[in-house]
Amino acid sequence: MTKQLLTDAIVRSVELGGKAFVPYIMAGDGGLDKLKRDILFLQESGVTAIELGIPFSDPVADGPVIQAAGERALTHGVTLRKVLQTIHSIKEEVTVPLVLMTYLNPIIRYGIDQFVADCVRSGVSGIIVPDLPLEESELLKPALQKGEIALIPLVSLTSPADRIKKIVAESEGFIYAVTVNGITGVRDGFGDALETHLTKLKDISPVPVLAGFGISTVKQVQNIGASVDGVIVGSAIVQALYEEEYEKVKSLVNASKPIPIGK
């Protein structure tokens, strides 16, 4: 799949009257065999795309739930290379776009050109690299562009207006709008300025805007999703899959669907 297919999947969700829903899962939490089951379960549940987190020893953006999942995956010997091998093995069964969330160090160790080649081979549509600033994006972007893979930018609540404009101008796939100041994790509420921030970002963005970090309930999916093109839900999905609470996962996904007439 290519970056355009990722964007198209998000746009299609909105055109159908709902919002895009992208679950984040920790690849290899429970082992690589479970990764296949989780991807196919989420696909069957109607998600728009799936974000696959790669376990890393120093996850600066991750809250406690995702850190714990990463540690469990590392005990199973999960690596970036093994994740790509696994998703390549199920490529013919996967119909939703896949996005990798990894830190820069594993990519450098892998080798940028080989990493991109294996992403293309495995059907990856986009990557998110939280510790890669805009100013250093040329380190990866040329290779990713050759592979038709989106380098998805993050925009924080504290990003100055001029920096947001620069990020937006370079954006592809979608923009990841971070909804909180801090790490990932379940939260009870969000700041009053969030809706204004998201609306302004959506007004200037040429690609869809998805909001993520801290979104964990059906109401939050609906309320925050109303200001953007969709949501990314991480910690709540990771914990529910770990505890095999599959109905909870489905309820979160369904919160992004169009509301039937008469409801």
Image: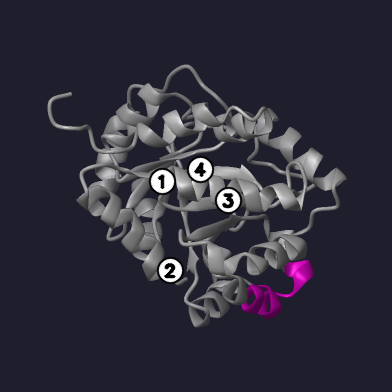
Q: Residue 172, image x and y in percent?
A: 40, 64
Q: Which residue is mark 4?
A: 23
Residue beneath the point at 33% across and 37% down: 256
Distance CA(mark 1)–CA(mark 4):
11 Å
Q: Nearer the viewer, residue 72 or 46?
A: 46
Q: Which secondary structure, mark 4? A: strand
Please give the range of residues in magenta.
Answer: 108-118
How far apart are labels 4 and 2 at the CA level?
18 Å
Residue at 35 percent across and 43 percent down: it is: 230
Q: Label 3 vs label 2: CA separation?
A: 19 Å
Residue, disc 3? 39
Q: Which residue is mark 2?
A: 3
* 31 in relation to 122, above or below: above
Q: Is residue 100 magenta?
A: no
Please report whichever mark, 2 or 1, sits nearer to the chain's N-terminal start: 2
- Name the disc covering residue 185, or none: none
Within 10 angstroms of label 3, few (less than 14), some, or many (20 or more) residues?
Answer: many
Q: Nearer the viewer, residue 131 or 47?
A: 47
